[in-house]
Image (cartoon, grey):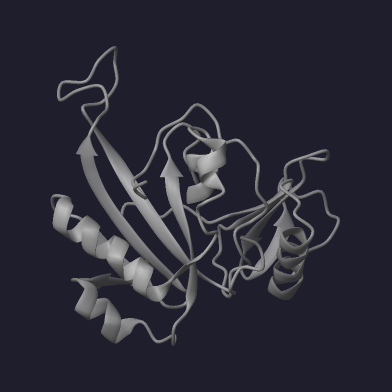
Amino acid sequence: MSLAVLSVPFVRHLFPPPSAPLRFADGDRYEWRWPSGDAWKRAEGHWRPDPDDGWGWLNDAEVQEALKGAIRKWRPAYSFVPRLPGARLPGRPVDGIEDLDRMWGYPSPSVAPYVLDHQSGRLVPVRDLVAQHDPDAAYDFAPTITRAEMLDVMGSIQKDQERPEFSYDESAGRLYARYRRPSDFGVRGSAGFPSTVTCLHVFVLSAPSEVR
């Protein structure tokens, strides 16, 4: 199955976080989906409750340990939600695979692939989105992929999509790939839907996953 973006009504939470990111960025979220529905958002290098109830902050190390614990104990209630980029992708523009190879300074890293879910407007792990169409097949998707696999996906996007854009944000340890494709509703759109959709892939530098 392709890593192309899939549009579904909601994301079914079968899995814990794919991995604990090695780096974070302001705007990232750490959430406990149930029973409390608590959420923390990173701002100015600290994690604050969202909404802020005055109960104090977390730091990056504490969030990393919490995510690692959720992975070890298989707790789908916990999630990491990377920030969405703005009109301009963060970091340095990338011209292609060779360009990224020169920039990417991490030896054989593990990366967690996220994609934009058009229904929720959030970045979600690829296998969580696949689970909406085929929960059994989703278990065949590794939570993290290798650098070579990431470059293979990037190469496919570069080859198959018109005018894709890529960027590499070293400070956050992330590669962004964005492009537009025809809507599933046809070239002219239907019932008010746009004729094209924006697809976004975000590869988050992560510790190798302890869960397959």
Horizontal and vertical percent for residue 58? 77, 66
Residue 104 lies, in percent from the top left, at 36, 82
Q: Position of residue 180 (x, y in %)?
A: 23, 43
**Residue 157 or residue 81, whichever sits in front:** 157
Can residue 89 be seen?
no
- Report which quarter residue 56 is drawn in: bottom right
Q: Quadrant of residue 27?
A: bottom right
Q: Is residue 21 visible?
A: yes
* Residue at image location 25% in from the left, 70% down from the top: 93
Position above or below: 7 against 138: above
| Quarter holding residue 17 | bottom right
* Looking at the image, residue 112 lies above or below residue 201: below
Q: Position of residue 47 (x, y in %)?
A: 70, 62
**Position of the C terminus by quadrant:** bottom right
Q: Is residue 84 left or right of residue 1?
A: right
Query: Looking at the picture, does residue 129 appear above or below residue 102?
Result: above
Q: Nearer the viewer, residue 207 or 118?
A: 207
Instruction: Name which residue lies at 27% across and 86% down.
Output: 102
Q: Is residue 25 above or below residue 134?
A: below
Numbered label tally: 0
Residue ranking furthest to the top: 191
Side of 43 relative to 157 (left or right): right
Residue occupying image coordinates x 55% and y 59%: 143
Left or right: 179 in relation to 142? left
